[in-house]
Image (tube, grey):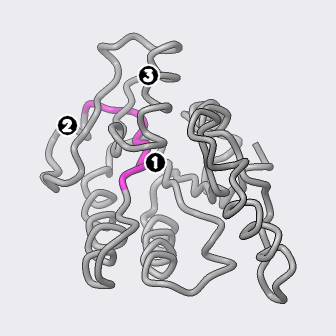
Amino acid sequence: MRILITGHNGFVGSYVMAELEKRYDAMDLFPFSFREGKFSAIYKNVDVVIHLAAAKNGTEEEMLEANAFKVKSLLDACKYVEHFIYISTEFIEAFDSAYTRSKRIGEIYTQDSGLNCTILRMPHLYSKNDGFMNSKPFTSFYKLMKNVKGVRFRSKPEDVRVAAKKIVQLTGNKKYYNRLVYFDDI
């Protein structure tokens, strides 16, 4: 199976690449720089696209460009791809922000693409090495948000290494085709 991954140098993407490299031959993995935005015939040579690249900061226009409009262009270039995996966030259900609105539009484009796609809504991810999970600001924030009316988290915060394994489990798995999936569903 040949796999193209966007966002391979990012926080989650670097862990997903490491997990893919354990399971697949390096010749079958195609890291792609989404910033370049040049979508070409490479998609004729891959079976699965894992789309992790995202803009989390910037103006609303910048986030719409990166998280929605470029996704639409990417999807249009993937007409020969067997499986497209779009990584989203479960914060869509909890917060109204430029980031969550742009990710929701990306989800809609993915759902309407006609491709075999999986949309994975990820929880908050952390690395056990960063110490943030045990920090007072994080634990206070998470406890506070769990008690805010209308804010619902389906999944607890998760270690990014566990998330990477779950993302790789989706790869080419027909059970998850054409579904919106939450982290705890895998």
**Distance between mark 2 and mark 3 Cα atoms:** 14 Å
Q: Which mark is residue 42?
A: 2
Q: Is residue 5 left or right of residue 114?
A: left
Q: Position of residue 28 (x, y in %)?
A: 34, 19
- Tell whether label 3 touches label 1 (CB within 8 Å): no
Q: Look at label 2 and name its amino acid.
A: Ile
Q: Is residue 100 above or below residue 16?
A: below
**Mark 2 or mark 1, earlier in chain:** 2
Which of marks 3 and 1 precedes in the sequence?
3
Q: Residues within 10 Å of mark 2 (few under 14, many from 20)?
A: few
Give the residues in magenta. 45-53
Please give the residue where the numbered disc 3 appears in the rendered image. Answer: 1
Secondary structure under the numbered disc 1 in the rendered image: strand
* Rendered position, 143 above or below 101: above
Q: Amino acid at mark 3?
A: Met
Q: Position of residue 80 (x, y in %)?
A: 33, 44
The crowd level at tag 1 (other Cα within 10 Å; few <14, some 14-19, many 20+) is many
Q: Is residue 46 magenta?
A: yes
Instruction: Determine which residue is flagged by label 1.
Output: 84
Q: Whole-percent x and y of residue 6?
A: 33, 44
Image quadrant in which you'd find residue 29: top left
